[in-house]
Image (cartoon, rainbow, N blue to C red):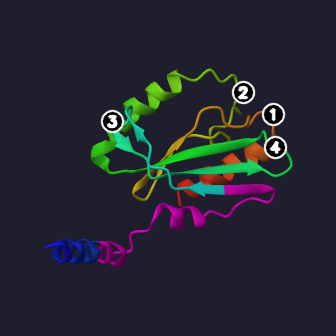
Amino acid sequence: MRRFITLFLLIGVVSLNAKGQKTFIEIINDFKLPLGWDVKISNDTSYWPLFKKKQLGSWTLTNKANKHEKVSFFIFNYSDKDELVFTEGINSYYMLSSCLNISSKNESSNFKSFQKENFLFVMAMCPCSTAESTFCRKLAESIFKWSYQ
């Protein structure tokens, strides 16, 4: 019986990959990282009560020259049926923030949560300031452009 279940799960995983469904790591690796940034990807399956889900991992980008300038995203599986739960959860999560970062006036020059393929990238609180740092603004613009490709 165990072999049957294992075989069934293996066939399911192979068929998902055969349909062209990427992992979140493959999706992140498609992002052209601007010069001057380090990347850290972790597999973290913490449970988020606000979203009623476990996250899959996180993606952190840190400025090599100024380690205080960084932005992180928590990554979750996403489908259209999750939209309401995630929207409410994201709003509640950001209301807990005590960040005093100044944002750019240009929407595409700010960090924000986004959906890419079947994953939701939830921006962690307190990213680097896009109004004060050219490096952060350029990174935010690159992520914004890539998120819509």
Q: What x and y, as percent, mark residue 66? A: 84, 44
Q: Amino acid at mark 2?
A: Ile
Name the image quarter holding residue 146.
bottom right
* Separation of marks 1 and 4 at Cα, in angstroms: 7 Å
Q: CA distance from mark 1 to mark 2?
A: 7 Å
Q: Is residue 84 above or below residue 67?
A: above
In magenta, the rendered stretch is: 13-39
User: What residue would you read off at disc 4?
Assistant: 134
Percent of width and height locating residue 61: 68, 50
Q: Of the two numbered discs 3 and 4 on the same chain, state the one appearing first in sequence.
A: 3
Using residue 36 as the reference point, say whether residue 86 is left or right of it: left
Which residue is under mark 1?
Answer: 132
Q: CA distance from mark 3 to mark 4?
A: 34 Å
Q: In which quadrant of the rendered image does the N terminus lie?
A: bottom left
Q: Is 50 displayed left or right of 42 in the figure?
A: left
Q: Residues within 10 Å of mark 2 (few under 14, many from 20)?
A: few
Sequence-wise first label, 1 or 2: 2
| Amino acid carrying mark 1 in the image | Glu
Query: Residue 139, percent across and down?
Result: 71, 50
Give residue 85's mark: 3
Q: What residue is disc 2 on?
A: 102
Q: Is residue 6 magenta?
A: no
Instruction: Please name the residue shown 54% across and 54% down the image.
Output: 147
Task: Between label 3 and label 1, give the one nearer the viewer.
Answer: 3
- Let me know if residue 30 appears in the view: no
Residue that protrudes farthest toward the right in the picture: 65
* Residue at (43% x, 59% y) in the render: 117
Upstream in sequence: badge 2 or badge 4: 2
For the residues bearing labels 1 and 2, Cβ distance under 8 angstroms: yes
Q: CA distance from mark 3 to mark 1?
A: 33 Å
Residue extending farthest front? 2
Q: Residue at x 53, y 55 (%)?
A: 148
